[in-house]
Amino acid sequence: MSACRTTDMQIVITFPDGAQRSYDSGTTAMDVAKSISEGLARNVLAAKVNGKVQDAGLPITEDSELALLTWNDDEGKQTYWHSSAHLLAEALEALFPGVKLGIGPPIDRGFYYDIDFGDHHFSSEEFAAVEAKMQELAKQNNEFERKSVSKADAIAYFEEKGDPYKLELIQDLEDGQITFYTQGGFTDLCRGPHIPHTGHIKAVKLLTTAGAYWRGSEKNKQLTRIYGIAFPKKSELDEHLEMLEEAKKRDHRKLGKELEIYTFDDDVGPGLPLWLPNGAAIIEKLEAFAKKTEREAGYERVKSPHIARESMYLKSGHLPYYKDSMFPAMEIDGDRYYLKAMNCPHHHKIFDALPRTYKDLPLRFAEYGTCYRYEQSGELFGLMRVRSLQMNDAHIYCTEAQFEAEFQAVNALYLKYFEKFGIDKYVMRFSKHDPAKLGAKYMDMPELWVKTEAMVRKVLQSMNVNFVEVEDEAAFYGPKIDIQVYSAIGREFTLATNQVDFAQAERFNLSYINAKNERERPLIIHRAPLSTHERFIGFLLEHYAGKLPVWLSPKPVVILPISDKYLDYANEVGNYLKNLDIRASVDSRAEKAGKKIRDAELAKTPYMIIVGEKEQEGRLVSVRQQGGHDLGAMSLQDFAEKLIDETKI
Amino acid sequence: MSACRTTDMQIVITFPDGAQRSYDSGTTAMDVAKSISEGLARNVLAAKVNGKVQDAGLPITEDSELALLTWNDDEGKQTYWHSSAHLLAEALEALFPGVKLGIGPPIDRGFYYDIDFGDHHFSSEEFAAVEAKMQELAKQNNEFERKSVSKADAIAYFEEKGDPYKLELIQDLEDGQITFYTQGGFTDLCRGPHIPHTGHIKAVKLLTTAGAYWRGSEKNKQLTRIYGIAFPKKSELDEHLEMLEEAKKRDHRKLGKELEIYTFDDDVGPGLPLWLPNGAAIIEKLEAFAKKTEREAGYERVKSPHIARESMYLKSGHLPYYKDSMFPAMEIDGDRYYLKAMNCPHHHKIFDALPRTYKDLPLRFAEYGTCYRYEQSGELFGLMRVRSLQMNDAHIYCTEAQFEAEFQAVNALYLKYFEKFGIDKYVMRFSKHDPAKLGAKYMDMPELWVKTEAMVRKVLQSMNVNFVEVEDEAAFYGPKIDIQVYSAIGREFTLATNQVDFAQAERFNLSYINAKNERERPLIIHRAPLSTHERFIGFLLEHYAGKLPVWLSPKPVVILPISDKYLDYANEVGNYLKNLDIRASVDSRAEKAGKKIRDAELAKTPYMIIVGEKEQEGRLVSVRQQGGHDLGAMSLQDFAEKLIDETKI
């Protein structure tokens, strides 16, 4: 703060890049923006003041860190969509006088509002009218005005308006903490923040409706939830709608069924996928790939049971802290056994099974261990949210001196995988501790935190990866990196984490003999770059729109005899390829070649081999690539070589 | 019976080969034997009359099927060892007057007797004296005389003798059903049968002692259990003792620890092995081998969760019939979930996930599925009796017309595996139904039983495999084959079963559309030729005495630099091999080459590569084979090619 001189009436604003400027006390974020440029000010949606998001128009009265939030910031978007929800409510009140309002928050992509339409049955056919009204109101450039109200006044307002839901919400609020927001003729109970005015909302689209019980309880009335999205530009909305349309086509649940990847069965249970042969083939390929890269990276494979005694999870701390996410106990011989929710404790036991010295380290134990986690049945979603998880798991036990190189190697593995799967957009979120919370939220090992975080940052910087640093979001036991990747159509998936662990070695009393012949605790790195088979295959199906690359395709080639006369030769070709470990199949149906080709295209088969008289006589294959590209006739051997090359992992 | 004319005083004896002869009623099996040959009679130990084993000296008074039992029959051996137990008791009474006797049955290999020595502490140092006394008594050729006694007389006898244990046993017996056996001066309460006389017992050996609670209850007194074995020839005893000695060295628990294959941990739980990297490496090799052969045999891989809802197991019939062998339920969302004890129901669900027609069959679903079975903790034994079982499982769904070829293919797989693992001694036990028990013990599908059993027999005969037919031991749902293999030292292991199943398709309502466009139930074959990883690796460790063949060895090659100067070159060699997917390691310890070689031999490493100046300069490796055979120096590439060839699966 010494860089600027301040008077009593002045405050110092520190910007994200560390630059500082002094302003009159009571200045607003919008004033600050204007002082920089009018263009910037036009784009400001909200402000982050000392870590808290608030209206850009609120006065700032003390020295503060300030970030001006625009559409480019996640928190800017969230504020924008929150305001859009208010705009939706305003439009609905205008069109359907007397509707009662529930809540209307922003969500990951867009917003919703829960509405009680009374006797009216609202349907998506009315979307267009509502959208038009929203656009009309938005053009009025109405400001979002914030006002503090007493609890009594708040109650009086909504009693007069006759809105039972808001009244119920007010009951739970403390007097003195209640605020209203008004834009145009519409006032809502809301803690904010909001964008400066409705004029920012240029393009809106209502997406869908759903029933939603008031406050999530089946005992309450079911309201109509209306989902929507809004953008500052029409072109962005169009792009988004296109992406949604494409995502629908690429929905892994739809593709999973069409391509016979997996299935669910009532007698097995929700969230427990059964992998059909095509799915198992993809799993085999992924595992072969993971095992190869892990072998090259010096990992050793281990294998552990899916259950363990209660004492194991008391030691690890999963019990009681993680109990709600675990399946309940099975009682045997007076003991409780649990399905494992994580592989770590089992791996720690394998580390501990033999005496270890510094010469044995680093030890890298990898296992495709299937874990079981209890998710509420309402939370289950295709392969993305399941109860059985086949994790690409590994734990690295190393010395402090080895940590940096090990962490770097793990990150290199991530980058290698991104390249392999054509993931060109990703963010690594580097979550750090807060020194003020050592001993409480974080393990009290200040030096180790500082040292490992510095090493993690150094690794991320030196590798030139795309990362952001996040304060106060580390795990209890160490800094971590969450990896978010974006599918080909730009949808975000949180796939994996890469974590440092100071705690488990202590809990499991793990040690090695160091060079001074003393016992020392190893550092542990948890990593799962290929996530779980469930989530990763779900992601890949969307990412590739089901058209998996040849090496990963469960059916890389299908042989299509143009008539029964060439079935023998087709089988000969099929067997030749199968013997080379290529999962070829023959379409022996009594269908026309055209139909067979269409079906193979629908099944996203990379290569179709058409065999008829010419091919049989010349011991050739005519090769057609997915999407219609004709590669012409070639010898079976040439084609096999090409395929072997393309299916190599 | 019409083949022989009989008078009232004559009976017809039918021999196992179907031949019939008539004898005077009241003739004994021994008389029959003598009528055939004196030599045979000398070898007869007992008789099987109409399926029941009894003394060879008992009169036969009705037309009967008769098998004369000798040392070559399992039941002959059992009778022999039972009599040996009596001989042990006789010797102990002679040497330790006043000992009280518990029970003395034959066991799988040998016999034991539970003895209350009172205040005397019996130890294995006294074995020799007891063995000598047994031999002395045996030479007296005392007959085993059977006598029926009333309950009152039996009680009176043992009251006078003062034997509380026998008195307790008598209490539970019915009057009229009690028999005594006497040889020489020793009389025991016993239902028999016994061998003709003690003279058959030529070579005895007491093996070990153990504490054993009377009647298996901890509430009772602990008696001294003495285990022994006896043979008709000294040479057979010697062979057996040698085998036991060898088995001790080959004990998979001992080798499993020494070779760092697996471990148990208290916090994980008994019967739940954790596989260390060496064990996991063996598993990987076995799976690669199984997957390759199964792929070649037209199997498809599937993958299923380790749990399922209660409804699944009610459908399959595991509940309630198999409940005691299953882990207890986990309650979720008001439902019960169970760990799977078998993979079949999950595979049936995968069959049922898509509509199937006759053109899709046969479908062969393979999975290395881990099942969980509850075994009493006292029954757990190393890898041979565990609670987690990684099964080399598969289910074949086929039409009746396809059954024979499918069954034959499964058997061919077994034979292929026997050859691969050097198993030259095996027996397939073909267990059949009993037509009298159709609808009760066996599914009431008489034609299908006859048809499939005939097909199974035809397959076994045509393949010229070693098999025995066993009446009335089929599964409820179809005929089955149990495969018993013998390790290199002749110990028997029951590894796997191959079963036909008529029932599950019905229970799961599985069907396919046949060529007539009608719904039809598939036949199902269950098979697991490589057993479970646990049992099979346990077997292989004994079979190979830990010296696994190169392809299966978790550490096929270790590189031994003769000094630190050659460590870089050693690592270069190691990395070269690792890049070829050969699990090579470098012994970088500061030890003498001699010590490194000795340790590599102890670790059963197939190849030791010694590198020093000569090797480094010439880019060579000096290769030493396990057991000391020196293969001399060769180029690294030549050695790698040799190894690739030997590790091919």
Image (cartoon, coloured by chain):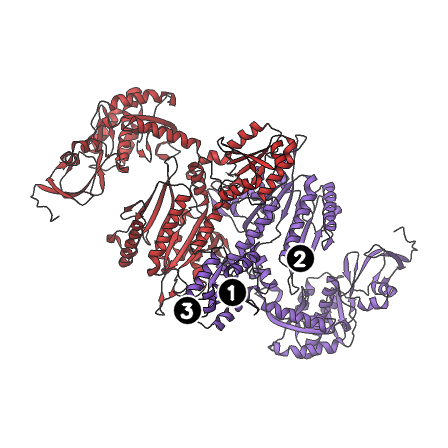
Chain colours: A purple, B red
Q: Chain of mark 3?
A: A
The answer to whether mark 2 and mark 3 are in CB contact below 8 A is: no
Q: How many marks?
A: 3
Percent coordinates x, y for residue B115 in the rendering: 33, 27
- Along the polypeptide, which appears first: circle 3 or circle 1? 1
Camera-side mark, 3 or 1? 3
Give A643 or A484, whichever is nearer the viewer.
A643
Q: Nearer the viewer, mark 2 or mark 3?
A: 3
Local packing at callout 1 (Cα closer than 10 Å; few below 14, some 14-19, many 20+) is few
Q: Amino acid at mark 3?
A: Asp
Examine the rendered structure and indicate whether residue A12 appears above or below residue A443. below
- Residue denoted by label 3: A564
Q: Earlier in the sequence, mark 2 or mark 3?
A: 2
Q: Chain of mark 1?
A: A
Residue A558: in sight, yes or no?
Answer: yes
Q: CA distance from mark 2 to mark 3?
A: 50 Å
Locate residue A614, reporting x and y percent: 47, 68
Coordinates of residue B225 in the picture (x, y in percent): 36, 29
As rendered, which of B489 and A336 lies closer to the eye? Answer: B489
Q: CA distance from mark 2 to mark 1?
A: 26 Å
Residue at image mark 2: A484
SS type, badge 3: helix
State the mark number for residue A257: 1
Q: Nearer the viewer, residue A117 or B391?
A: B391
Residue pushed farthest left?
B7
- Determine whether, in the image, residue A592 is placed left or right of residue A376: left
Query: Quadrant of the rendered structure where residue A345 is?
Result: top right
Q: Residue at x 54, y 41 (%)?
A: B638
Q: Are marks 2 and 3 on the same chain?
A: yes
